[in-house]
Amino acid sequence: MTTAERYRAFAVREARGQSPAYEALALTVSADQRLLGLLDELPKEKRQPNLLFAAAQYLAAPVTAPDEFRAWMVRHWPKLSATMLRRRTQTNEPARCAAMLPVLARLPQPLALLEVGASAGLCLYPDAYRYRYGDGAAVLGPADSEVRLTCAVSGDVPLPESTPAVVWRAGLDLDPLDVADDDDVRWLDALIWPEQQQRRDRLHAAVRVARADPPHLVRGDLLTDLPALAARAPADATLVVFHSAVLAYVPPDTRTAFVELVRTLPGHWISNEGTGVLPGLMPAAVVDADGPAMFVLALDGRPVALTGPHGQEIRWLIPHTVSV
Ligand SMILES: C[S@@+](CC[C@H](N)C(=O)[O-])C[C@H]1O[C@@H](n2cnc3c(N)ncnc32)[C@H](O)[C@@H]1O
């Protein structure tokens, strides 16, 4: 796929209906040879629309005015490209905890949580957020939590009655972000699309939660460094290795090797990834190719639900009487 095709596909398939600003910017970039030429100076994995636009927001570019943006991008290319080379797409969405909670709550408690691809670790606090499922069919979590998550449900979702008991939490990431570092938090903020103020507010609320009890994050790779971190989990808790929106960033053979590795670890494994990312985990029949993008939530390699990419929805796939 050329860079022009990549930006056009992003505009039409990802930004349309979600972000008018990014749709317009991506179409502008896709039709502009000068801008495409600049992007093509970068390594292929650094040409992503999300990375360009996050770096632009981070540098206070006029992202809602495509004509001005074009001139801005040409003029500020040295610092823009330097930011793209230094940073990664590391969007950290605490609301994904709402999608994973029904599975976490049913595992033998207490839990030792190990998140692979943790970014700043905001998904490591499922016990600190307040949840509302469906039309209030289940409401749980600390009543005074600043992070309030709502999640639509369909199918036979086993609604949790209480949040899990977490006795240990740790994260692994190629480049962990530090919730105590204002510049890292500014990068997390820049990764959120311009119109999504609610997500921005949620991010900052979750950062405040994490700052009160910072997560233990280890710099490392999901293949080479996972066993050593897993070995540090307390033996008297259920180890849960989980990942969400991570495996799309690694090549298919690494995904396969990761699945083989994670199956050798004790405890349980929760995967929450885009429908095409681990094809072995998803019966093609339940994926609506024309519908909105969804993630597959799987426990120990068995799909249990489709989930909204930002944790906003759960469609349970199996009878909840089937034990997880
Ligand atoms: C899109 S973020 C998702 C963060 C978090 N899991 C969430 O759902 O909010 C993906 C994260 O995976 C990390 N990552 C990508 N490849 C990795 C690898 N090979 N080993 C460890 N972490 C990796 C990135 O650095 C990034 O922080």
Image (cartoon, rainbow, N blue to C red):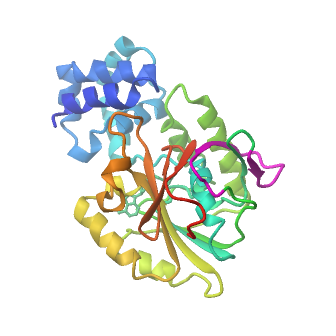
Residue 22: x and y, percent? 40, 24
Q: Nearer the viewer, residue 218 or 132?
A: 132
Q: Is residue 196 left or right of residue 209?
A: left
Q: Which residue appears farthest toward the right when viewing the image?
A: 144
Quadrant in the picture for residue 323? bottom right
Q: Is residue 206 above or below residue 61?
A: below
> Looking at the picture, how far across and down is residue 86, in whole percent?
37, 48
Q: Give the range drawn in magenta.
A: 137-158
Residue at x-position 33% and y-position 26%: 11
303 left or right, relative to 128: left
Percent position (x, y) of residue 249? 33, 53
Q: In the displayed structure, does residue 183 sit left or right of residue 73?
A: right
Please report the residue visible at 49 percent of the width from the left and 78 percent of the height from the top. Answer: 229
Q: In which quarter of the image is residue 103?
A: bottom right
The image quadrant in which ligand 1 is located:
bottom left
Screen quadrant of the N terminus = top left
285 or 184: nearer the eye?
A: 285
Q: Is residue 39 above or below residue 222?
A: above
Image coordinates of residue 45 in percent, x first then y, are 26, 47
The verdict on residue 257 being magenta is no
